[in-house]
Image (cartoon, helix red, strand yellow):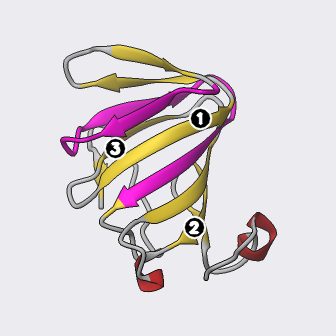
Amino acid sequence: MIVRSFEDIAGSDHDVAWGNGQSRRLLLAKDGMGFAVADTLVLAGTQSLLEYKNHFEACYCLSGEGEIEDMDGNRHVIKPGVIYALDKNDKHYLRAKTDLRLVSIFNPPIQGHERHSLRPGESSAY
């Protein structure tokens, strides 16, 4: 059985500044569960062009407000109670109107050291 708390992760090597926020990685590949779980903070006023080439990701919003936009220009409001799943390794913009707090699930699981490289006009991928 694996039991961890947010407090266990905060300030550890599992507490990663991912580019436009913070990712507290609660479960990783080394835990052997077949998926990873992170408590993700996306900072207010940020825009991230993201693309997960090696993982599927689902995010469930706990608090805050923002939007996700696909490469066809389709926008979807993200607010508490909304989940979005990137089931085709979808390249997308993630924008935070206010601080967003998400539960992020990755399959296959991330290792834990991954960080985004956010450069204008380029998607960050891992």
Query: In the rendered view, does 59 fall on the left or right side of 99?
Result: left
Residue 74 position, x and y percent, is: 29, 14
Distance in Å between CA atoms under marks 1 and 3: 17 Å
* Residue 39 higher or lower than 35, as above or below: above
Element assignment for label 3 = strand
Q: Disc 2 or 1, which lies upstream in sequence?
A: 2
Quadrant housing the C terminus: bottom left
Query: In the rendered view, does 117 fall on the left or right side of 89?
Result: right
The image quarter in which residue 50 lies = top left
Distance in Å between CA atoms under marks 2 and 1: 16 Å
Residue 74 in view of the camera: yes
Element assignment for label 2 = strand
Query: In the rendered view, does 27 fall on the left or right side of 89?
Result: right
- What is the magenta range? 80-106
Q: Which residue is tagged 1?
A: 61
The image quarter in which residue 54 lies = bottom left
Q: Which residue is tagged 3?
A: 50
Residue 71 position, x and y percent, is: 22, 25
Tell me the amino acid under the disc marked 2.
Arg
Distance in Å between CA atoms under marks 2 and 3: 18 Å
Residue 92 position, x and y percent, is: 31, 33
Q: Which residue is tagged 2?
A: 25
Residue 20 in view of the camera: no
* Residue 11 higher or lower than 115, as above or below: below
Nearer to us: label 1 or label 3 = 1
Q: Is residue 87 magenta?
A: yes
Q: Mark 2 packing: few (<14 Cα in 10 Å), some, or many (20+)?
A: many
Residue sitting nearer the eye, 103 or 124? 103
Q: Disc 2 or 3, which lies upstream in sequence?
A: 2
Q: Is residue 82 magenta?
A: yes
